[in-house]
Image (cartoon, rainbow, N blue to C red):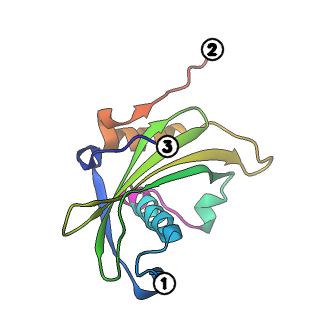
Amino acid sequence: MKQSDASVFKFKTQVKVRNYEVDWQGIVHNANYLLYCELGRVEYLQHLGLVLDVNTIKHGARVVVARNEIDYLSSAHYGDMIDVHTRISSIKNTSFIFEGLLKGAQTGRDIAANVSIHVWLSDTNGQPMPVPDEFRRTVQSFEGKNAAIHWPTIST
């Protein structure tokens, strides 16, 4: 997985490591890093003005995670503040790619890097469907040249 530089991320939120997220070794359990990335994705979409609730998610389509990769770079501990950098780096025909970078808020230390691929599915037949143009426009408006956005061509 390609490691990202925090300077390409336009969105950041923070999370404080809670006691129940730490394992018997005294470090954040590996599964919780994926939860931090999910928190970043949800807050990123809300920041872009996209409504996320049961009614919008089930409105003719749904978005599912098709692949989730994570590189663990260093450990986080109870009480640490983590900067969760999030961006959409690419939109293709039926899928889009989120990237996440977790960094220590006080130290700037790289903690984890995440890439997740999301697929837009029809709610009626479960088959992949094109990413809506409005979603593409919203992301392009925010990310600018930092996102590779494929616009399908319509042949006549």
Name which quarter of the figure residue 110 lies in: bottom left
Marks 2/1: CA distance? 58 Å
The amino acid marked with disc number 3 is Ile
Q: Which residue is mark 3?
A: 97
Q: Position of residue 150 (x, y in %)?
A: 49, 28
Q: Position of residue 120 (x, y in %)?
A: 63, 45
Judged from this view, the residue extending furthest toward the top is 156
Q: How many marks?
A: 3
| Circle 1 Cα neighbour tier, 10 Å, few/some/many (<14 / 14–19 / ≥20) | few
Marks 1/3: CA distance? 33 Å
The amino acid marked with disc number 2 is Ser
User: Is 48 within the magenta?
Assistant: yes
Residue at 61% x, 59% y is 57
Q: Tell me if residue 131 can be seen.
A: no
Q: Tell me if residue 13 can be seen.
A: yes
Contact, mark 1 vs mark 3 (Cβ under 8 Å) = no
Q: Which residue is mark 2?
A: 155
Secondary structure state at the residue bearing disc 3: strand
The amino acid marked with disc number 1 is Trp
Residue at 46% x, 80% y is 21
